[in-house]
Image (spheres, rainbow, N blue to C red):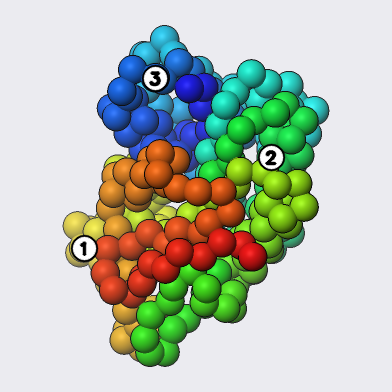
Amino acid sequence: MRYFVTGGSGFIGANFVEQLLISDDGTLEQVTIFDKLTYAGNPKNLQHSLSDPRVSLIVGDICDHESLTRQMMNHDLVVHFAAESHVDRSINSAAPFFETNVLGTLNVLESARDTGVKTVIHVSTDEVYGSLQVGSADESFPLLPNSPYAASKAASDLVVRSYYKTHKMDIRITRCANNYGKYQFPEKFIPVVISAALNRDEIPVYGDGKNIREWIHVVEHCKAILAVIKKGAPGEIYNIGRSPFFNHSKNRFD
């Protein structure tokens, strides 16, 4: 199996590549990481993985269709992590989020069509559901994004749905709760809180402090993605979380 991993030097992508190598059952032939190496992408995250001769890093932008298509040739499966992902940054400047998350995803799908890739795993987020006042969200829950980042991811999910319906591609969507763990960018919530505590600084409180977030360790998230690759089906959406906040019910795009 030959994997093409967009955004593979980022927080979740780099952990996924590690788990892919750890879980190899003898069928893994090649892992190509395609990454723009923005502020959130760090080649140091890949130091261990790149020591494996089957793993290579290509510096590239998913918004560059020609380069993306050229590098994607001769792969079996795409795992699409590449995205602008920080809510606060999207509030200050939304355009890069829609360029990368929507148009970039469109390019990934077009390149997969052009190169005959068999399966695309689109890694999305629980942010597309917005905030829940009560109860839980399953995969059929309405998309009610509250930030430009969340809106861009919801839009990319709909682009993916359209390609499944129109072109009958094997595409699967995962929507995960908040991640924490190794390689996380320091501006994210848990690193910010830990850093403040270690430095005896004031720990930030968001809103009135009563909001509840669903958290999952990044390794568990990556294992769930591997399960979707092995056991999932075309046109399905999979919520990934650690508590009853996510009640999984089989739901195809149609």
The residue at which mark 1 appears reads as 197
Q: Amino acid at mark 3?
A: Thr
Q: Is residue 2 left or right of residue 102?
A: left
First in residue order: circle 3 vs circle 2: 3
The residue at which mark 3 appears reads as 27
Q: Which mark is residue 108?
A: 2
Q: Is residue 56 visible?
A: yes
Q: Is residue 27 above or below residue 81?
A: above
- Disc 1 is placed on an element classified as helix
User: Which residue appears at 72% of the width and 51% of the height?
Assistant: 163
Residue 132: x percent and y percent?
Answer: 44, 84
**The C terminus lies in which quarter of the figure?**
bottom right
- Disc 3 is placed on an element classified as loop
Q: Are marks 3 and 2 in contact (CB under 8 Å)?
A: no
Residue 232: x percent and y percent?
Answer: 45, 47
Q: Is residue 103 above or below residue 74?
A: below
Q: Is residue 54 left or right of residue 5?
A: left
Instruction: Tell me where residue 17 sits by quadrant.
Output: top left
Instruction: Tell me where residue 241 sits by quadrant.
Output: bottom left
First in residue order: circle 2 vs circle 1: 2
